[in-house]
Amino acid sequence: MTTTGPDFASSSLPRHLVRGAIGFGGLIGSVALIPATGPVSLLLLPVGVLALRGCPMCWAIGLIQTVSRGRLKRTCEDGQCRLAVADERRKGG
């Protein structure tokens, strides 16, 4: 039996890194630009939160999931869960 939990991964690593740049840029910019633009800069806050899918920790978990996707497999049997290297499909070529 293979279990699945919340999935925060992106379809590719470059896409996930772009989401991170937009998200963290939006969060940092919303605070850093307050002296220059006033409260209007806080409009970047929702952009950053949406790009990070809710929180910076969710993005970090998604980064780990994106990097490990297809390489690691979690299975649970008889009340014990294990993490193992997934079968390599590219062998023999």
Image (tube, rainbow, N blue to C red):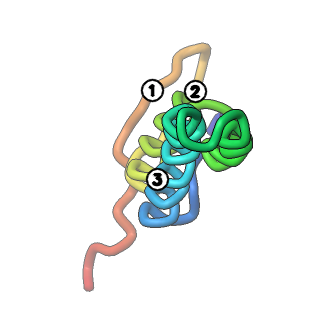
Q: Is residue 40 above or below residue 58?
A: below
The tag earlier along the polypeptide, 3 or 1, is 3
- Where is residue 60? Give x, y as percent: 47, 36
Q: Residue at x 54, y 33 (%)?
A: 35
As measured in the structure, the alpha-carbon distance from the residue carrying label 3 to the one carrying label 1 is: 33 Å
Given residues 12 and 38, the one toward you in this image is: 38
- Mark 3 or 2 closer to N-term? 3
Q: Is residue 21 left or right of residue 40?
A: left
Mark 3 or 1: the one toward you? 3
Which quadrant: the N terminus?
A: top right
Q: Are marks 3 and 2 in contact (CB under 8 Å)?
A: no
Amino acid type at circle 2 is Cys
Q: Secondary structure at mark 3?
A: helix
Report the disc number at residue 21. Answer: 3
Q: Which residue is mark 1?
A: 82
Disc 1 on helix, strand or loop?
A: strand
Q: Are marks 1 and 2 in contact (CB under 8 Å)?
A: yes
Q: Quadrant of residue 55?
A: top right
Count of numbered tags: 3
Name the residue carrying label 2. 76
x and y, in percent, of residue 70 in the image:
45, 56
- Residue 28 visible in the picture: yes
Please rate how many residues cluster around mark 3, counting C-alpha atoms within 10 Å: few if below 14, some from 14 to 19, many from 20: some
Give whichever of 54, 5 is nearer the camera.
Answer: 54
Residue visible at 53% across and 42% down in the picture: 29
The answer to whether residue 1 is seen in the rendering is no
Please state which amino acid type lies under the numbered disc 3: Ala
| 5 up-or-down from 87: above or below | above
